[in-house]
Structure formats: structure tokens, C-alpha cells
Amino acid sequence: MRPAPVRGEPALPAWIREKKVRLSGLHEIKQLMRGRGLSTVCEEARCPNRSECFERKTATFLIAGDVCTRACGFCNIASGVPRPLDPAEPGNLAKAAAALGLRHVVVTSVDRDDLPDGGAAHWGEVVRALKRDDPTRTVEVLTPDFQGRETSIDLVAEAGPDVFNHNVETVPRLYRAVRPRAEFGRSVGLLARVRRRHPGMATKSGMMLGLSETDDEVLEVLRHLRGAGVDIVTVGQYLRPGAWNLPVVEYAPPERFERIREAGERLGFRHVFSGPFVRSSYRAEEAFLASGSAARD
């Protein structure tokens, strides 16, 4: 069950209020997506950057349906019993990416705990379809944890994405409320496995601030991620997407994000993208290129 509504959130500070969703850039991409039976996580999760990204003709494709088998406290995607996978989805997604002229494509999915492989084979087909359509295009996957199944993790990684992203989302102390069916160690282990088996593939993870985590806890998470060989890390502000989601405990000021960015760089991450409106797929191509991962052997 999702948490009940809670009142009494802190007032929006100026650095949050100044970000407004503009509707003018949404129509063209929405029309293209609907025409091909596709979804974006930008819309499903009510991302605050969606109008900016849509105006730039970029989007994070949501595959394997728009109903999740989990109900994480921070997420606005519907939970329940998903529909069967669409075998036409890989080809349709590749056509949409071509129509948008995308050089760097980000793909994510709902959790599909109803499937024996968690949807990993479908993931592999999507990555291969994107690569066949344009071998020069870079592909970034933002995957679920596949319940820790090594065969599923390997199926996705062996399809050849350029970036393998899996978010830890928050600090271990808060997992019961934020990610009740996930495990911090499982998520870090997934990233470490990809690094060991595919040393030339960029790895990435992200987390949110604003749910009562301390700076010491955030730094410990960053140490674990760096120890797993993660290259790129994103840190953003949690914004409550709906009445049934967890309330915001605090709004982290810009200077806190800057401290975390500096700490991450000292730990040796190739790129740390930290700010109130940073999301794991926001300006993903920029983060990939800035990390130097594109040039790594």
C-alpha cells in the first residue's frame, strides 16, 4: 500500500518555486509517443524537467508497460498487475528515437516481478533494436534490480548499452519506507557485477535528498557506489509527485548539493551531477560525455 497523505510539508523555497513546467513544448513529443503506443517516464513520474526535455526533443522511454509490480513510496507510477509485454515495442521505440533525431537514448522500465526474468530479455531486445537502427547512437539503460537475478542483469548488459544505470535512490536507513521491496546491498551488487563483467561500460547511479537523510549517510552511500566502480552519480531533490507519496521532510539548499558534488569528486567519480532539479536521466548525454566514459577503452 502507498503511504497515506501527510500534511505539513515545509514551504517551497525560492530555488524550487522558480522551476515551472511549461506546456508549450509537450504536444509534439506526446503525439509521437501516443502514435507508436509508447510512454515516457517523464510523464508517468511527473518529472519537473519534462517540459524542458520535451522542448529539446529528448525523453526517457518507459518500456515494459506503465504499471509497476511494486509501490515505492516516492514514485507516482501506477502499481498493480501489468499487461503482457508488447513484442512490437523494441522496433517502435527505435523508430521514435530516429524520428526525434536522438543521439543518446535513455530507457527505463517499471518493475516486472511478475515475469521470470523481470523483463530482462525484453530489455535486451530494446537495446539491440536501438543499436541496429543507428550503430553510432549511444544507449543508456536505467534498470530495476531484477530481484538480484544475475542472469537477468547479464542479459541486459550483454546487449551492449553504453551506460548501465541503476538508482539506489536513498540511504539504507530509509529503504523500508522509500523502497520496501528493494535492498541497498542488492542494488550496489548489481552495479559492481556490471563493472566486473563489462569494464568498458559506464556505470551510473542516483539518489534523492529531502527524506531526512544526513550528510554522513549520503557520503557513506557515495563510498559504497565508488567502491562498486560506479563512474557517474546524480543527486537531486525529492519532490512529492502525488498526494499518496511520501512527504518531503526538507528542501536541501543549493549549497548542500554543492558540498555533495565536491565530496563525490574527491571520492573519484568521473562525473557528479548534483542540484535540486537533477534527475538520473536529466541531461544524460551531457553527463556521459563529461564523465569521459565515451573515450574509455
Image: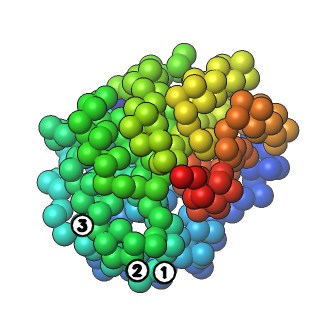
Q: Is disc 2 placed on a helix, strand or loop? A: helix
Residue at 74 percent of width and 50 percent of height? 16
CA separation in Å, label 3 and label 1: 18 Å
Q: Is disc 3 placed on a helix, strand or loop? A: helix
Q: Quadrant of residue 149?
A: top left
Q: Quadrant of residue 152?
A: top left
Viewer can see residue 124: yes
Q: Position of residue 183 (x, y in %)?
A: 41, 22
Q: Position of residue 109 (x, y in %)?
A: 35, 51
**Amino acid type for the residue under numbered disc 1:** Gly
Direction from residue 177 to residue 79 in the image, left or right: left
Q: How many marks?
A: 3
Asked if labels 1 and 2 touch by Cβ distance under 8 angstroms, the answer is yes
**Amino acid type for the residue under numbered disc 3:** Glu
**Amino acid type for the residue under numbered disc 2:** Ala
Q: Earlier in the sequence, mark 2 or mark 3?
A: 3
CA separation in Å, label 2 and label 3: 14 Å
Foreground pick, 264 / 282: 264
Q: Which residue is mark 2?
A: 98
Q: Residue furthest right?
A: 255
Foreground pick, 68 / 148: 148
Q: Which residue is mark 1?
A: 101
Residue at 65 percent of width and 34 percent of height? 209
Q: Residue furthest front?
A: 297
Q: Which residue is mark 3?
A: 89
